Image (cartoon, helix red, strand yellow):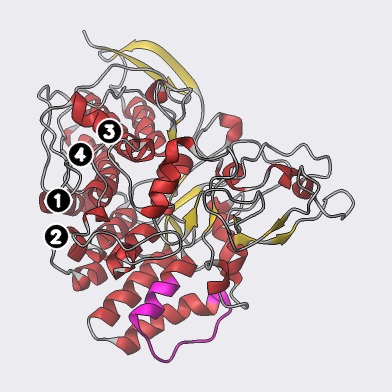
Amino acid sequence: MKRLNISISNILPGRKTWLGVGLLLAMASCTDLNEQLYDKVSQDDYGKTSSEVATIVGGAYATLRGYGSGTPEGAGIICYPTCEYVFFTQECSSDEACIPTRGTDWYDGGRYQQFQRHNWDAKNSGILSVWRYNFTGVSKVNAIIYQVEQSGLTTEDKQKVEAELRGLRAYYYYNLLDCFGNVPVVTDFTQKELPTNTPRKDVFAFIEKELKEIIPLLPSGITYGRFTQNVANTLLARLYLNAEVFTGTARWQDCLDACNKVQGYSLTPNYKASFAIQNEKSPEIIFSIPYDHKQGTVGNYLASMTYHYNQKLAFDPAGVYQWCGNGICAQPGLYSSFDARDVRRQSLLIGQQYSAKDGSEVLMDDGSPLNYTEEIDNFTDAAKNAGARLNKYEWSANDSWERDNDWVLMRYAEILMMQAECNFRLGYTPTALTYINQIRKRAGLDDLTTLTLDDLDNEWKHEFVFENLRRTTNIRFGTYFKPWWEKPADPADKHTGIYPIPQEELSKNPNLKQNPGYEN
């Protein structure tokens, strides 16, 4: 009789999986965050009814939050919650963000300098985190699908439940396709053989097939935090938007067709409403990761990774705000690339900081003013106040280490931008302008009357600043391989468009082959 450790709290240990990456399976918290503990419940006894299965399925959604070093999945390696190394690796390899070395802070073996300069290797632990975050999600979803298959649900009900799970798995595989290209595609929890690489085109085809098959089975309409038809069509549109990069064949019209099926959402009049503490109220959010620190959710402390240590004095009159690490910030030139009227520029914090207690200047530990500068004079020995800070999500003086803002994965503005870009690339510039100008109007900017690829690229950069889309956009527009601040031009073969498969994974699984350009 198979026995499973099931926790509807957070991330608790389960059984090991075969995937060759040393991952641990677990059942995790339900998306409604109501804690119930089932210790060593027999699979034969639990998971037979629809309510029990729904509880178990919640564990699949919880995998989106990632894992900290205090969890079994993160034991022995750096942590990989969504907001930290997974986010860092993507953002700091783009032209958007960076993590300067400040004295002895934020060197960490040089991994952040490698992100910036595109000279990473297979031993970079941030890249390992991206791999493990996504494959841990895949492994847990496969385990939960297996358990649903053993449940007492009808065949029809199993198909509906599994459709959501397959959608989450497709989301993880999209990330893997984007980041690594040639990754193993495994859907069978009982498989014992170590998997081999699947060519990038075939990974693309797998994701496309999965999404098209599950869409009729998914919930229609809007259900916050669930993988619905709208979420699946948004992911399918993303897939088609980047199809030329992934497969060599453009799929612009297919992207438009998928976008047209996303219904029921609207732009919020206030751009920042989608990033408020209670952003679940936003009519723009298509898919997000729910967070509530009172329920013990983990993986949402990006604010603590960006602000200077003494930012607490500007946020909290008592000066007891959560610890800040003075790390990730904007690259020079990002802040000034925004029009002064653009409300989205408020996503970056710059300038002198003032005490929330008495309005005096906040000082750094050396007595100089805490005045965030856009410029970073020395990437490898930066001043403590250098770099505009990530200020997109609303903060409060009462914030805990884990914030309560839900982490936005997809929102309606992305649909509009995909419609603008695809129409432009297909030659329908007037139609493209109707979509991009909706975005610009909300930002407080004048309508464009003409359109170029550079205009589209800039609008993607400004609308989705610090939303983990920039690296993919850089690659699609070709800017990724050009020189920019503290980065030379990439190698002529452009192998840096995907990351190397981590050396730890190659060592554990001899069936895996390294991606081209990283063999030595």
Residue 94, position as x, y percentages in the image: 40, 58
In the drawing, what numbered circle is on residue 200? 1
Q: N-terminal of the two: label 4 or label 2?
A: 4
Q: CA distance from mark 2 to mark 3?
A: 26 Å
Task: Work out which quarter of the rendered image holds the C terminus and state it.
Answer: top left
Q: CA distance from mark 2 to mark 1?
A: 7 Å
Which residue shows up at 42% across the image and 69% down it? Answer: 460
- C-beta proximity under 8 Å, tags 4 and 1: no
Q: Which residues are magenta?
A: 442-459
Residue 107, position as x, y percentages in the image: 50, 39
Question: Which of the 4 image quarters holds residue 477?
Answer: bottom left
In the image, what residue type sits under mark 3? Val
Q: N-terminal of the two: label 1 or label 3?
A: 3
**Is 30 left, or right, of 25 in this rendering?**
right
> Is residue 447 magenta-colored?
yes
Q: N-terminal of the two: label 2 or label 3?
A: 3
Which residue shows up at 62% across the image and 78% down it? Answer: 341
Q: Find disc 4 in the rendering and name its residue.
A: 159
Q: N-terminal of the two: label 2 or label 1?
A: 1
Mark in the foreground, 4 or 1:
1
In the drawing, what numbered circle is on residue 247? 2
Task: Work out which quarter of the rendered image holds the N terminus and state it.
Answer: top left
- What element does badge 4 sit on? helix
Q: CA distance from mark 4 to mark 2?
A: 30 Å
Q: Name, please, the residue furthest toward the right.
A: 358
Is any part of residue 266 visible from this angle?
no
